[in-house]
Image (spheres, rainbow, N blue to C red):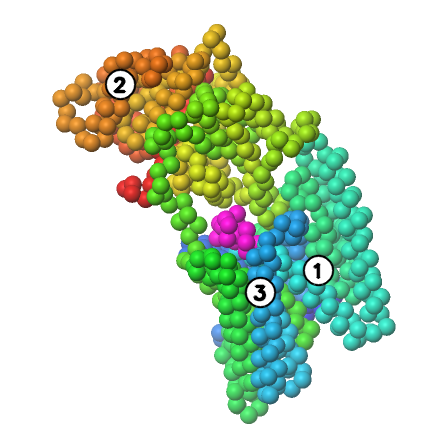
Amino acid sequence: MYNMSTQWDEKIFFATSCTYLPPRVNSENPWWSIHNMLPENSLPMLELQMCLIYFATMCIHAFLGRLGIPRFTSMSIVGILIATTYNEEWDEVREKLFSIDSQANLGLISVFGYLLFLFYIGVKTDMSMVHRTRRSAISIGAIAIVAPLLCGLAVMHFYSTKYLDSIQAKKLGAIAGLFSISPFPVISSVLSDLKILNSELGRLGQSSALVTEIFNVFMTTILTVSNIMAKKPSTAWLCLLAATLFVIVVIFLIRPAMLWIIKQTPEGAPVNDHYVYCILTLAMVTSYTSYLFGFYALFGPFVLGLATPDGPPLGTAIINKIDTIVNGVLMPIFVTTCAMRVDLRDLMNWRDKVDGSLDVFMAQTLVIIVVSTVSKIVACALPPLFKRMPLHDALSVSLIMNCKGIVEMAGFTLVKDGMGIPDNAFALVMMCIIVNATVMPMLVRYLYDPMKKYAGYTKRNILDLKSNTELRVLTCIHRPENIPPTINLLEATYPTKEEPVCAYVLQLIELIGRASPIFICHQKRKRTDTNNTSMAGKLLDAFQNFEQEFNGALEVNAFTAISPSEMMYDDICTLALNKFTSLIVLPFHKQWSSDGNSIVLEDESLRELNFSVMERAPCSVGILIERAQMTHIFSPETPYTVCLFFIGGKDDKEALFFAKRMTKNPHVRLTVVRFVTSDFDSKVKDWEELIDIEILSGIKMTNKVGDAHVNYIEKIVEDGPETALVIRSLVTEFDLIIVGRQAGVETPQTSGLLQWSEYPELGVLGDLLASTDAAGKASVFVIQQQRTTMDA
């Protein structure tokens, strides 16, 4: 049988391009004529193999990805399909494509990819999580590795050793040890794929995995020193001393140099490429250095990555440089080449080749795998249950800590080369890893629904707020340009001691260059650095000054969330849920120039975020569209003119009650424009329309809200185009226009407009005001009332 295995003993192979050699043409098989022109150990052959692996992985994942199956599984399937023996014709084809000579080059490229991957993960890891780790995470992380390891070793000592010799027992011990680990790179990748990285469960899983990773590094170091001592006792302590000195140099010399680079980089400016290239080169040097003192060549880059400051600017610059080549090209090659060492026929081989009896080592390997997996599932579920976590969530944490992936695959590949694990046992172990990596995330997705916590049973909106109660608002800031319009909007609500406003200001930063999301609570009153020019500093200064204007009627709490853009909604909705807010204010995804005449920025990821928040928010949501980007001065000389367009429905009523709060501001002038049809009075009213009439009747009769004057206007329109004409004639007179979203709802007043809607998240009127010049330089605020579980 053709053997696909590659000797990964850390020798360096040099690929040679022998294009000058005469072509070898097989006249009997013309389909291979072009292939036969390529020497087996050549650069063109390597390129052909890489292309085949990449495109095969992409094709399989295009199908499996729709079923929620991880990309890791697709990579593994490609390797197994290539390596499995089907018939003699396939063996011949495979031997030509992946000959033994050419495998050395492919293996070298794949190991280089794994080296960069470990450096990449190290850079993204936030080591400060160790100090912030809660006791529950420490207990889960510790028990996740200790419990399965002890159970596996106990079963091996009291049961398996009865059937195995000492060499086989040593191999089985290595299998038990590797199946006990919960590597941080694997757990972080699974949480990211499940899109729960910054959820409460995701944060707990990451913290626990980081604790386990510390155990992994400690145990690996001990085993490495033990192996060196067994081979060369005289040099073992010297190697350990060299490794310790290496870590000290990285922490106390190289890391300060990186911090110096960050200080030399102006805020907002990219890190000089020369610094980035020097660090990448240093990663290669550390690999060779760790190899010299007897450790694995992968040890150095991982330690260097951990020492590199994560996040912007340096960590982000490094990640941006290597992300595509590592995750898009090299890692599929590495996973595929590891899986290429598995022949499915070996998996079926459960009989001893000598006497035909059951292969004892194979059976004991399966026993150890089952014991390790079951013990870890049970053990990891106990600490959360002890903390009274719901059963589904506790099981989800346990399953997350049991996820396997690329680190285990790489570990077993090295163990096979170093200890000579039999092919059938190796095939069993690798298949268990692949099945685990496929099934565990699917079970977590089934058990844990992060959206359930947002389900609204309690009314959290402006309409249902009692009089003389605090209005809690969560405002989201992406760029400094979002600060002035947000302050204008909050100032227009006019916080008073009778009706105070509590504003939670959340700065949102995309997670790049680190693996762990971060949520920061800023203590403004303890802050003394008034010269801080960072985004957070500007935000704190602006809102601290704004808070002082209202002397006890306004409270501002500032936060910063650093998370992937596709998961930012969880930070927003969770904070809104925990702080019992009635309104979330989101900035629009387009940014206009200072004069409001042209678009200078359009962020589609921000638009997707707004959609996600509107679908899940536990309270009302508003999107603020700022056209002119200017700070309004509230005074009798410059009144803030506000207009509310009202057609009817829940969102319009929510917008009306928000606008009514502004009438208590003596510097705000409110105009309510209601659009009705000519046959409005003769139509049979449904319940919603009766409520609309009742709410507006007081304003219509007295032109007042409380003691404040309100200008009430009714416009008769027959269809959408007439409504659009009226809006165009009115909006240039106002500073702020408020409308209800009414998503997907078409009324006689808006007929013909819905089909031309460009921004569904804004509703019909909001879309009209945002997508044309109809609004002039006025700001637009589109409100959606809280969607509860009772809503259809």
N-terminal-most mark, 1 or 2: 1
Viewer-closest of 412 and 661: 661
N-terminal-most mark, 3 or 2: 3
Main structural element of the magenta stretch: helix, strand or loop?
A: helix
Q: Which marked residue is nearer to the observer: mark 1 or mark 2?
A: 2
The image position of residue 363, as x and y in percent, is 53, 82
Q: Are marks 3 and 2 in contact (CB under 8 Å)?
A: no
Element type where label 3 sits in the image: helix
Residue ID for mark 3: 144
Residue found 48% across the figure and 7% down from its top: 637
Residue ID for mark 1: 298
Residue found 36% across the figure and 30% down from its top: 466
Magenta stretch in the rendered image: 191-206
Q: In the visual, does 286 lie left or right of 563?
A: right
The image position of residue 724, as x and y in percent, is 31, 19
**Disc number placed over residue 698 in the picture, else none:** 2
Element type where label 2 sits in the image: helix
Viewer-closest of 106 and 742: 742
N-terminal-most mark, 1 or 3: 3
